[in-house]
Image (cartoon, rainbow, N blue to C red):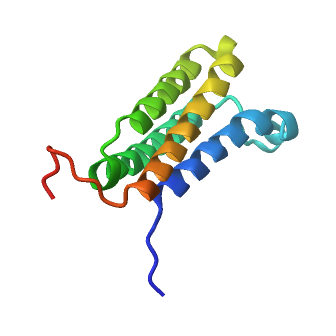
Amino acid sequence: MKGKFNWDTLGIATSLACAVHCALLPLFLTSLPIFGVNLIENFTFEVVMVVLAFSIGSYSLYHGWKRHHHSLLPLSVFSIGFIFLVLKLFFAHYETWLLIPAVFCIIAGHVLNYRSCQVHNHAHADDCDH
């Protein structure tokens, strides 16, 4: 059985995992430090999650742009989301106010990319070299 791997689906799942981590972990798993696990306030873990989500998302959006739709809208929405996400790392006092638009824009960018790829199976533009 042949199937194509959908990078947008992985990007959406990664973004949702990040949102779950940021929103639910502090509420339900506050006892983790008792066991020596500290993921709630671990800056390194936060940076790794952001880099992972950015890497997967960037590849997914580039692939959709290059091979299918040539639209910069998904990449623009995704980039705005990541600006908010990076700002969240440095301005912890505004974490919730920055996280909500970040997650919304990142997921919206993936959804726009996915829909654009479905509509334009392979759109050629003047700059298309394949």
Question: Most extreme residue toward the bottom, as rendered?
Answer: 1
Left or right: 10, with 59 as reference point: right
- Specify the quadrant that holds the C terminus: bottom left
Q: State how many labels appear.
A: 0
Residue 117 in the image, given as x and y percentages of width and height:
42, 54
Identify which residue is drawn at 78% across, 39% down. 25
**Residue 59 visible within the image:** yes
> What's the residue at 50%, 43% (across, down)?
112
Q: Which quarter of the picture shows residue 55?
A: top left
On the image, the x and y values in percent for residue 54 come to: 45, 40
Residue 39 seen in render: no
* Residue 45, picture quadrant: top right
Q: Is residue 123 left or right of residue 126?
A: right
Name the foreground residue: 96 vs 80. 80
Q: Residue at x 27, y 50 (%)?
A: 66
- In-front residue for pair 35/18: 18
* Residue 93 spot, x, y in % from top left: 68, 12
Q: Classify 3 as above or below 89.
A: below
Residue 57 rendering spot, x and y as whole percentages: 45, 45
As drawn, 17 above or below 39: below
> Which residue shows up at 54% across the image and 56% down it?
9
Asked whether 30 or 110 is in front, the reply is 110
